[in-house]
């Protein structure tokens, strides 16, 4: 089946499909016109689409579709129970649904949502209802978490072990990497080897103040992990027992990372200069790929704009398909590129979209 691409933007959800005649890719739908789409998920178990919206005055909303966007149903959005309080005893409210994740076949209805402020919500019925994961919300160390680019800390990465849905890993900016082995009952920090160089030397290895911008693991080799951190690129090959720093030789800053679903040594990044500037260094815009676990990196330029080009790619705006051949990414300046050969060549689908927040293959 030809790939389909879902693109969440500041002004709605765009759908592009690959056809058999020129132009190879065409926009086929635009949903939620004018409304920011903060997260999208295609549930691989059912094919259900989920779209998280961020209405300004009306707050976050969640919609599901079981017919590839022909019809949408609004369902209850993740929300804090009335008795929840923050560290200063004020009632919390979900500002943004930042990420959505599906469990494996062993838990057919299980979905998880990560939000700003940093919280995790669980659905056991495919997104029809949600409950707060209080064990993570009540972690004592949560009082030390802080915002990285947002006023409050945010939970942006959720990885559910496809072998055992009780094993869940989350990434928080700025709050580190946390793993539950017992169905969300308890949590342990998993940041050994990470360094937060924005902190004083005595706190740089502190697990609760790390800023992993995005964490992903390999579908076929789930003990292999990659992290694009605020302070560099990190890799784990021992199921998060430890992380090793990877030096690309170029920029090690960025937001997005994707790993090949069947090859744990192959990963992609879209670097930027630094947190202060958030642009490609000297306008040198490229995708970076390793095929050997980070020992070497290569710049992928073919089909991307020539220097100078100042595109920035957010953490959820880079995706790889389920077989590892097609890649896609979108920029804050409204451009979207796709590759059918693991990044060797790129094709721009559009340069006219609103700022891109997230992309996902169907």
Image: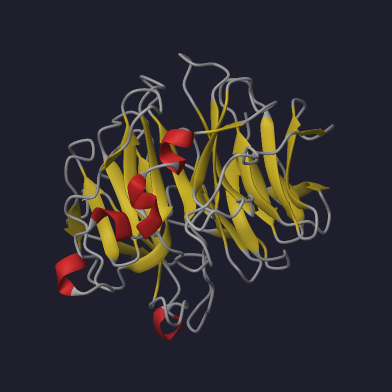
| Residue at the image position 50 percent from the left and 84 percent from the top | 308
Q: Is residue 234 left or right of residue 339?
A: left
Residue 332, placed above or below residue 310: above
Q: Residue most toward the top?
A: 106
Residue 16, given in percent of the width and then of the height, sits at 71, 47
Percent of width and height locating residue 206: 22, 58
Place of residue 362 in the rendered image (x, y in percent of width and height, measured from the top left) = 61, 35
Instruction: Report the residue at 59% width, 53% height from top.
Output: 358
Closer to the camera, 30 or 154? 154
Give residue 114's position: percent from left, percent from top: 53, 44
Measuring 60% from the left and 68% from the top, which residue is drawn there? 332
Q: Is residue 183 visible?
A: yes
The correct choice, above or below, for 331 with respect to 117 in the image is: below
Query: Image height check: is 273 above or below 175?
Result: below
Residue 178 located left or right of residue 333 = left
Camera-side residue: 355 or 178?
178
Q: Is residue 18 visible?
A: no
As displayed, is residue 27 above or below residue 186? below
Camera-nearest residue between 327 and 153: 153
């Amino acid at each position: 089946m030809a790939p389909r691409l879902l693109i969440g933007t500041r002004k709605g959800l765009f759908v592009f499909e690959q056809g058999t005649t020129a132009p190879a890719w065409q926009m086929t739908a635009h949903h939620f016109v004018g409304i920011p789409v903060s997260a999208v998920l295609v549930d691989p178990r059912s094919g259900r689409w989920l779209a998280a919206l961020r209405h300004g005055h009306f707050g976050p909303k969640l919609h599901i579709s079981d017919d590839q966007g022909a019809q949408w149903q609004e369902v209850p959005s993740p929300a804090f129970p009335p008795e929840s309080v923050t560290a200063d005893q004020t009632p919390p409210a979900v500002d943004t649904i930042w990420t959505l994740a599906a469990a494996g076949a062993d838990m057919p209805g299980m979905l998880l949502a990560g939000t700003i402020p940093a919280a995790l919500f669980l659905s056991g019925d495919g997104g029809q209802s949600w409950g707060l994961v209080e064990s993570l919300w009540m972690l004592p160390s949560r009082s030390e978490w802080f915002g990285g680019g947002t006023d409050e800390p945010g939970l942006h990465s959720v990885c559910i072990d496809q072998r055992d849905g009780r094993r869940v890993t989350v990434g928080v900016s700025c709050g580190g990497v946390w793993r539950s082995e017992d169905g969300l009952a308890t949590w342990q920090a998993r940041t050994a080897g990470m360094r937060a160089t924005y902190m004083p030397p005595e706190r740089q290895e502190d697990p609760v103040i790390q800023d992993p911008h995005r964490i992903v693991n390999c579908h076929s080799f789930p003990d292999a992990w990659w992290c694009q951190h605020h302070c560099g690129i990190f890799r784990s090959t021992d199921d998060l027992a430890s992380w090793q720093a990877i030096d690309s030789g170029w920029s090690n800053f960025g937001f997005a990372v994707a790993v090949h679903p069947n090859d744990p040594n192959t990963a992609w990044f879209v670097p930027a200069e630094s947190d202060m500037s958030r642009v490609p260094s000297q306008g040198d815009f490229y995708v970076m790929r390793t095929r050997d676990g980070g020992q070497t990196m290569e710049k992928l330029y073919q089909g991307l704009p020539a220097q100078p080009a100042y595109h920035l790619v957010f953490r959820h705006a880079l995706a790889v398909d389920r077989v590892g051949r097609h890649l896609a990414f979108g920029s804050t300046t409204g451009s979207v590129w796709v590759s059918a050969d693991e990044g060797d060549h790129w094709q721009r689908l559009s340069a006219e979209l609103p700022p891109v927040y997230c992309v996902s293959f169907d």
